[in-house]
Amino acid sequence: MKKTVSDTWLVNGNIMIFCGSHTDSFKKDILASSLLAELVAVKNSHRTASWLTYTDTVIKTGWIVNSRATQQLEFENRSLLNVVEQSAGSALPQDERQTLAIALAQMVNLPSDSPAIRTIVEKLHKNATESNTTTDTPVSTTVLLTIIRNDKTVVTLQVAFETLHGIAIDILDQPVLSAGNDRQTNSWLLRSLLDERHYNLVRDDVLKKLGLNIETRLLQIPVPADLD
């Protein structure tokens, strides 16, 4: 297995993975525009409406749409990696799938009291649509995941799922996810590119709207010492 280069962030609790080498300025622009869209979208608790708000906002900041897709996936006792691969299809090449698998494993293996794990679990709870009051009651939640490919293509994916195992960090790597039986859309995909010239025109406005959120709502996942 060849060595992968990646950089993983939490954007208000959402996972963002940069695959390959990208400039710091490009990363900052993607992080800021995504954070702004997330803070606007989080005001709407309905998953479909929040997805539309999120994508509309990033498009306004200069993300050029290559393609969109929604699906009603069928899966049972699958891991998040399995579900993401099923949903993304050809939008996520093999190298990026490998990077995603490594990044998810690194997050799961962080110390249990790490800020990153706490942030991820809190976000899953906030996204939940049903309280898991008993062990046999499924809880439904969503994950918004953004993967920036080596070629700068931005693959943004929202997946909804149920689990009988409660909300914990092992949602990221254990086969505990199922589609449920509501037969509604549970996968939303946006493939886009950042128009950097357009973003140059709106960068100051984006940063002004974010204010201190740019410092408090972004969290970089530490790289394990043996990979540093």
Image: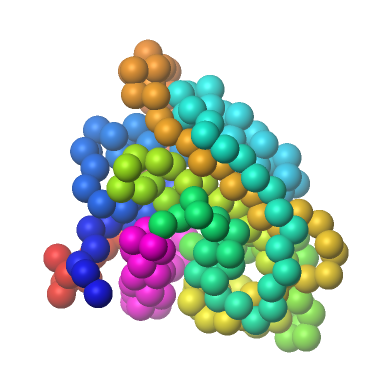
Residue 73's place in the image compared with 68, above or below, is: below
| Foreground of the two, 70 or 225 | 70
Residue located at (39% from left, 17% from top): 198
The N terminus, quarter of image: bottom left
Q: Is residue 166 visible?
A: no
Q: Is residue 173 visible?
A: yes
- Residue pushed farthest right? 182
The C terminus, quarter of image: bottom left
Please provide percent x and percent y for residue 36: 49, 33
Figure label count = 0
| Foreground of the two, 211 or 191 | 191
Reply yes or no: does residue 103 show up in magenta: yes
- Can you tell which quarter of the image residue 194 is in? top left
Residue located at (78% from left, 71% from top): 180
- Residue pushed farthest front? 90
Residue located at (83% from left, 62% from top): 183
Q: Is residue 33 left or right of residue 79?
A: left
Please provide percent x and percent y for residue 174: 53, 81
Q: Main secondary structure of the magenta part?
A: helix
| Foreground of the two, 101 or 208 | 101
- Residue pushed farthest top? 201
| Foreground of the two, 225 or 150 | 150
Please provide percent x and percent y for residue 150: 30, 48
Please provide percent x and percent y for residue 140: 72, 66
Residue 34's place in the image compared with 59, above or below, is: below
Rendered image coloring scheme: rainbow
Reply yes or no: does residue 78 show up in magenta: no
Q: Which residues are magenta?
A: 94-119
Q: Is residue 103 left or right of residue 123?
A: left
